[in-house]
Amino acid sequence: MSRMLLIAATALLVTACTSRESPQTAASGGPAASAAQQQSAGPGCTRSRTGYPQVDVKGATVGFSQSEKEANPFRTAETQSIRDEASKKGVNLLVTNAQSDLNKQISDIKSLLDRGAKLLIVAPLNSDGLQPAFDAAKAKQVPVITIDRKVTSQPCTDYLTFIGSDFVEQGKRAAQQMIKATGGSGKVAILLGSSGNNVTVDRTKGFKDGIANSGLQVVAEQTAEFDRSKGQAVMEQLIQSNPGITAVYAENDEMGLGAVTALKAAGKTPGKDVKIVSVDGTRSAVQLVADGSYTAVIESNPRFGPLAFETLEKFARGDEIPQSIVISDDEYDTSNAAQKLGNAY
């Protein structure tokens, strides 16, 4: 009887560990973001130029301001990466989430400062609007690193540096995949990301520039705000107004996955009748590429933790920090998606 109880207890323990650890593994597994080999030239930031005091990252209180709810896999993986690296560095990490509210993100950042944060990592909601928060950080001589979205404030003055992808290049690479999949002809619908940030602007520009000399024609473009349910709703509308659509460029995976649902409901076969290319690298989208129901995904790596803390450490040592640190992103298509699925998030 005791042996049976032991087996049952062990089974419960394994189940409990699995249920707790699976989300973290999915979010934080895969390669961390790394700086691309080619970086833009120009003067960078140093403590001597900015006047900030030296703060040893190890043992420091660091604030992380997340911009959006973590129903989006990109945000989940991003936050987990920051948490994981903070734990490795022995950092006292304070985390807030603005829930897609700009005013809340401003108050969140000010709250992190009031709670004693000596260093800040910020994932901006919009490119504009965070100046009051940056001013508050500057007044307290707290360095700020921004990740994944650029802001219109001044690097080395209002914040130290931006760490993230080359979004124009992502759009161009998506265009290349679309041309390859369609033979360079067809009618394309673009599911735009949220307005007010450089990600949407740059990914749109890169894609349009990339297909400019092909036979692909953009017949519709509408925002779905990087949201899956909105991506589905917008795609349903576009199918009605433009039944001849043969390709969809979604500026993130969540909108692309929403488009898949809408296309299937309309009796179309995604990946065959309608080619779909998106940007992110979520496990759900990459799995569909491997299954043949999706065309390609351009990666936008959210695992900024190691690079963000490494940058803060360099700044503390007095090293020069570039005003912008572009990371290297992968891509997934039918030739490699199955093999690289473990890198998705």
Image (cartoon, helix red, strand yellow):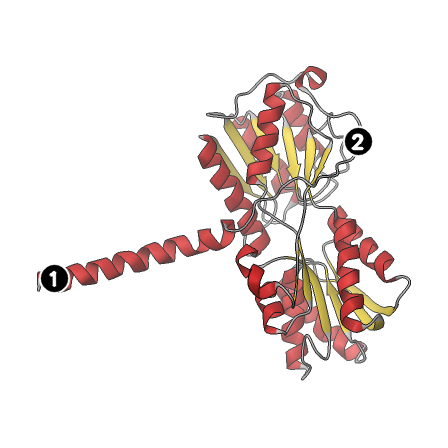
Is residue 202 found left or right of 312 in the rendered image?
right
Q: Quadrant of residue 184?
A: bottom right
- Residue 142 appears in the rendering: no
Q: Examine the rendered structure and indicate whether residue 197 appears above or below residue 61.
A: below
Residue displayed at 61% across by 45% down: 67
Name the spot of residue 319 as percent of width and height, x first: 65, 22
Q: Which residue is mark 1?
A: 3
Query: Which one is in front, 69 or 37?
Result: 37
Helix, strand or loop at label 1? It is helix
Q: Which residue is mark 2?
A: 41
Q: Quadrant of residue 272?
A: bottom right
Residue displayed at 61% across by 30% down: 311
**Type of amino acid at the residue the image marks with label 1:** Arg
Identify the mark nearer the N-term, 2 or 1: 1
**Mark 2 and mark 1 residues within 8 Å of each other at the beta carbon:** no
Query: Which one is in front, 253 or 125?
Result: 253
Q: Quadrant of residue 71?
A: bottom right
Name the spot of residue 24 as percent of width and height, x first: 45, 51
**Type of amino acid at the residue the image marks with label 2:** Ala
Q: Which mark is residue 302?
A: none
Helix, strand or loop at label 2? It is loop
Q: Residues within 10 Å of mark 1 (few under 14, many from 20)?
A: few
Residue displayed at 59% across by 28% down: 312
Spatial separation of the CA atoms under disc 2 and disc 1: 67 Å
Name the spot of residue 77 as percent of width and height, x first: 54, 50
Q: Examine the rendered structure and indicate whether residue 273 appears above or below residue 309.
A: below
Can you say which quadrant of the picture contains the N terminus? bottom left
Can you say which quadrant of the picture contains the C terminus? bottom right
Q: Examine the rendered structure and indicate whether residue 332 appears above or below residue 196.
A: below
